[in-house]
Amino acid sequence: MENETIVGIILGAGESKRFGSAKQLLPFGNTNLLGQAVRNANASNLEQVVVVIGRAADELRQSIEFGRAIAIDNTAYGAGCASSLLAGLDAASDCAAIMLLLGDQPGVTTEFINKVTFAWRRESPWASVTSYRGEFGHPMMFARKAFDELRRLHGDKAVWKLIEAYPEKILRVDIDAVLPLDVDTPEDYERVLNHLSD
């Protein structure tokens, strides 16, 4: 019987070039940005959660309760997001699919993660992308048969190029919500905090 495990990979190793300081450590509720993303994934129906960290790895290990999630270091994080994806794939090893989540996107809730997982199990597509009222975003999912293509990616935004290259293979999972903000700038962070307090 094939392994049907779905592994969530949280990409939290970025350099935060546009933000300046390590945005993963920014306070969010009673944790930080990355910590909230970890909580959301840990509370979901994902069988396994891998958190890829790079910049400020020591501080993140001390400040986040990883729970059932496995934290791994990506020492090549400066090479772009694809290097973190590769590190996550290596840690996920033999599984049916991976779900990609962003460590600076705390608004991707457990409910959203579960909905995307359910749709993938029902349809078993090559890949899926989440559509928030017509705007594409994360989570994204890729089946085992897409892993070779993923391993050939380089740099940032590489996964989006793969989504664009094979539109006929991509399942769109519709969620009736506004596209969750990801934090790239201090202004983004303020908007995320304001949304939290609404």
Image (tube, rainbow, N blue to C red):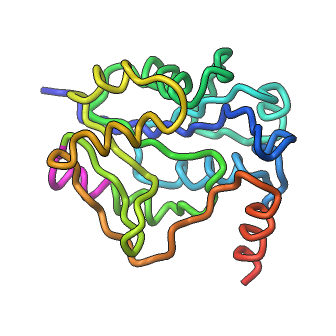
- Occupied quadrant, residue 18: top right
Q: Nearer the viewer, residue 4 or 26?
A: 26
- Please name the predominant secondary structure of the magenta segment in the image: helix
From the viewer's perspective, is residue 141 above or below residue 129?
A: above
Residue occupying the far bottom of the picture: 198
The verdict on residue 128 being magenta is: no
From the viewer's perspective, is residue 72 above or below residue 111?
A: above
| Residue 68 percent location from the top left of the image | 57, 38
Looking at the image, residue 16 sits to the left or right of residue 123; the answer is: right
Rendered residue at 65%/23% (across/down): 77
Looking at the image, residue 73 sits to the left or right of residue 132; the answer is: right
| Residue 6 percent location from the top left of the image | 34, 39
Q: Nearer the viewer, residue 97 or 189?
A: 189
Looking at the image, residue 126 sits to the left or right of residue 99; the answer is: left
From the viewer's perspective, is residue 11 above or below residue 30?
A: above
| Residue 28 percent location from the top left of the image | 79, 59
Quadrant where the N terminus sits is top left
| Residue 154 percent location from the top left of the image | 47, 23
| Magenta-tinted stretch | 117-125
Quadrant where the C terminus sits is bottom right
The verdict on residue 121 being magenta is: yes
Rendered residue at 22%/54% (across/down): 171
Q: Nearer the viewer, residue 78 or 92?
A: 78
Rendered residue at 37%/59% (across/down): 130
- Occupied quadrant, residue 141: top left
